Amino acid sequence: MMQFIENYHLTGVLVGLVTFLIIGLFHPLVIKGEYYFGVKCWWVFALFGIAGIAASVYFYGNTVVSVSCGVFAFSAFWGVSELFQQRKRVEKGWFPRRKN
């Protein structure tokens, strides 16, 4: 499969697709994470980011996998800061607040 991707110069397209899917995954994760756990779950996103960096370094020989892990890692780090921004959006009434 990787030979096909490389032969037809589709690496960039594949990385773009994977990036799109990862970012699309993190948007609802941040919203649901803040809704159910508040900003207390920031450390989970940070751990996923660290694991993603480690995986990116580990898979250095495979460009698509390494880059995808890097995108995952920094999307997770983005999620940490976005959790705190999401809390502000909830306070403004833009998103629903969970009733305890």
Image (spheres, rainbow, N blue to C red):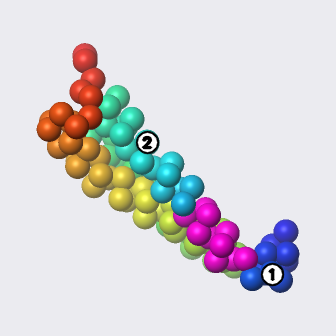
Q: Secondary structure at mark 1?
A: loop
- Magenta span of residues: 10-19
Which residue is painted at 45% across and 50% down in the image? Answer: 26
User: Can you give x and y, in whole percent of width and height, for residue 54 in the image?
Assistant: 53, 66
Residue tagged by mark 1? 8
User: Can you give x and y, in whole percent of width and height, for residue 92 in the image?
Assistant: 14, 38
Q: Secondary structure at mark 2?
A: helix
Q: In the drawing, what numbered circle is on residue 28?
A: 2
User: Can you give x and y, in whole percent of width and height, for residue 60 in the image?
Assistant: 63, 77
* Viewport quadrant of the N terminus: bottom right
Residue type, numbered disc 1: Tyr
Which residue is painted at 43% across and 42% down in the image? Answer: 28
Report how far apart the C-alphas of labels 2 and 1 lie in the structure.
34 Å
Please state if 18 lies on the left or on the right of 38 as rendered: right
Please state if 43 lies on the left or on the right of 66 as rendered: left
Task: Count residues near mark 2 (Cα–Cα under 10 Å), then give few for <14, some for 14-19, many for 20+.
Answer: few
Q: Is residue 55 visible?
A: no
Looking at marks 2 and 1 on the same chain, the residue that comes earlier in the sequence is marked by: 1
Above or below 26: residue 66: below
Residue type, numbered disc 2: Pro
Q: Is residue 17 magenta?
A: yes
Q: Are marks 2 and 1 in contact (CB under 8 Å)?
A: no
Q: Main secondary structure of the magenta part?
A: helix
Which residue is painted at 18% across and 34% down in the image? Answer: 93
Q: Which image quadrant is residue 34 in?
A: top left
Which residue is painted at 27% across and 23% down in the image? Answer: 98
Q: Is residue 33 visible?
A: yes
Q: Nearer the viewer, residue 94 or 47?
A: 94
- Return the residue found at the far top: 100
Q: Which image quadrant is residue 2 in?
A: bottom right
